[in-house]
Amino acid sequence: MAVSADCRFSVSAATQLRGAFPTRNLRLVGFCKGDFMGKKLNMKQLRRGAQSKNVKQYICMSLTTDVLGESKLRDLEMEKLDARTVVAVILGGGAGTRLFPLTKQRAKPAVPIGGAYRLIDVPMSNCINSGINKVYILTQFNSASLNRHLSRAYNFGSGLSFGDGYMEVLAATQTPGQAGKSWFQGTADAVRQFHWLFEDARSKDIEDILILSGDHLYRMDYMDFVQNHRQSGADITISCLPIGDSRASDFGLMKIDNKGRVLSFSEKPKGQDLKAMAVDTTVLGLSKDEADKKPYIASMGVYVFKKEILLNLLRWRFPTANDFGSEIIPASAREFYIKAYLFNDYWEDIGTIRSYFEANLALTEHPPRFSFYDAAKPIYTSRRNLPPSKIDNSKVVDSIISHGSFLTDCSIEHSVVGIRSRINSGVHLKDTMMLGADYYETDAEVASLLAEGRVPIGIGENTKIKDCIIDKNARIGKNVVIANSAGIQEADRSLEGFYIRSGVTIILKNSVIQDGFVT
């Protein structure tokens, strides 16, 4: 027993429980109908085993006494949190149709962001900064550029070490049998098709499985999330945040009790179903005014499962369910202990062209809602060994200029300029996201192209661009005007080298916009 200065008494004992079986494990057996990671459980043997010396239950109880003489008894986990008992699974296999044409030749997690990064760098960096060194990335569509980036950014030669862990790409594949002929049918099915990885010898120490998305922008300590999950005794924990009416129907919404337990879950409800999911979000600690503005609790698509629970859900309880958000989670809320974990910080789902565009430009704010500049928790990416950018007689206002770029006598306003960008004299960029280039053209090559009447990579002289995303290696000529002056919301003009999505003009990768073009 110990007594602290604030009159807190603590009693801890590391003893074996005899004649009792942990309540949460009994619940696990009941919900899984006797199935444990593919094996039938003998309940009599299980109860006898609970009394044996092989089963240890560590208890830590603290007795808190305040000045009013009230006391509270709490059961706390005594086990030391160990990141080696957690494996992260990053879902990167979606087709990314809402981000088209940026996903025309690349997977959604490989889409560039912030001038020098890729979307996949966000969950990967969060894992590294959280101490999680066992990571799987599931891929399916257009995965070549994603695989290339991962191999360059997160290998031993990059300076990052996973110690006794690993970072492995799991590509969609076909296996023997009729069922094995299907590609990933959804998020849950993708994990199900590789369930055997969590049952082999390398995963024997894994207790929890972290499910992450590859297209979100946020900074999070996943081990705080896992700690909360373990201390609550939850089977599944969902990271969530309060949200307002305008975007609520784009997310999975949940109702919780005053202790944070999820009572019901609805994936992207509309109309009356949406209104039915409104709750008093003051239970999350919001003020009355904040709660009135944000009456919904949205899932971030970030989950942590007990390993045995996840395997049983996928293999036995819901063997035909393909998606976590629309099938597994809503059905499990009626049977399992699902806990909501409030993430009270910046988070953005980069799922559409508009959200992608706005999230990138928001990085230029003062101060930005999300910043890549955090020495304690950096966002990692591929080491390119590029020189500093060279800026000659140019005006740059509220913008980000990535390394290896050349700006000459131009004006950049409220824009993000990607790596290896070349912007020539007289150019005016405003509210523009320029992804940069994969390679340089030498001065001799540029001169040769211009002499032949062709367009080099970058932006030519006296060009004006506004409300635009310029994909990599685009060649934009002289005296071009890209401003969507007609206010068109949707257009397919791929033969001319661009699309318009949600009012934003997207110049295609490797496309050529000839001199004098106006839109």
Image: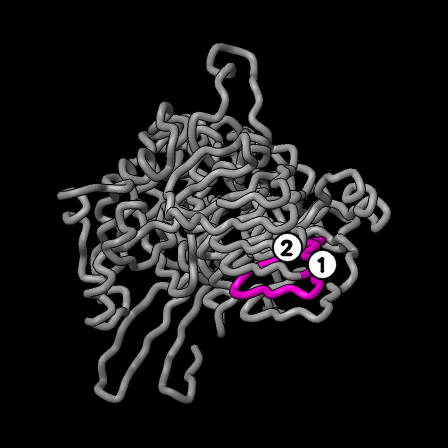
> Which residue is found at the position 48% from the left and 38% from the top?
499
Residue 468 within the segment the image draws in magenta: no
Residue 235 percent location from the top left of the image: 36, 46
- Protein image colouring: one colour
Name the residue at 20% across, 41% down.
270
Q: Residues within 10 Å of mark 1 (few under 14, many from 20)?
A: many
The reply, left or right, for residue 331 in relation to residue 147 is left
Check disc 2 and report the residue beneath it.
Answer: 418
Q: Which residue is mark 1?
A: 405
Q: Is residue 328 rendered to the left or right of residue 351?
A: left
Looking at the picture, how far across and down is residue 87, in whole percent? Answer: 55, 45
**196 left or right, relative to 403:** left
Q: Secondary structure at mark 2?
A: loop
How many residues crowd around disc 2 within 10 Å: few (fewer than 14), some, or many (20 or more)? many
Toward the viewer: 166 or 335? 166
Q: Where are the magenta residues, as a range?
A: 405-425
Q: Amino acid at mark 2?
A: Gly
Which numbered disc, 1 or 2, marks the residue that appears first in the sequence? 1
For the N terminus, the image quarter is bottom left
Q: Nearer the viewer, residue 129 or 288?
A: 288
**3D distance between C-alphas at marks 1 and 2:** 8 Å
Going by the numbered disc 1, the residue's amino acid type is Ser
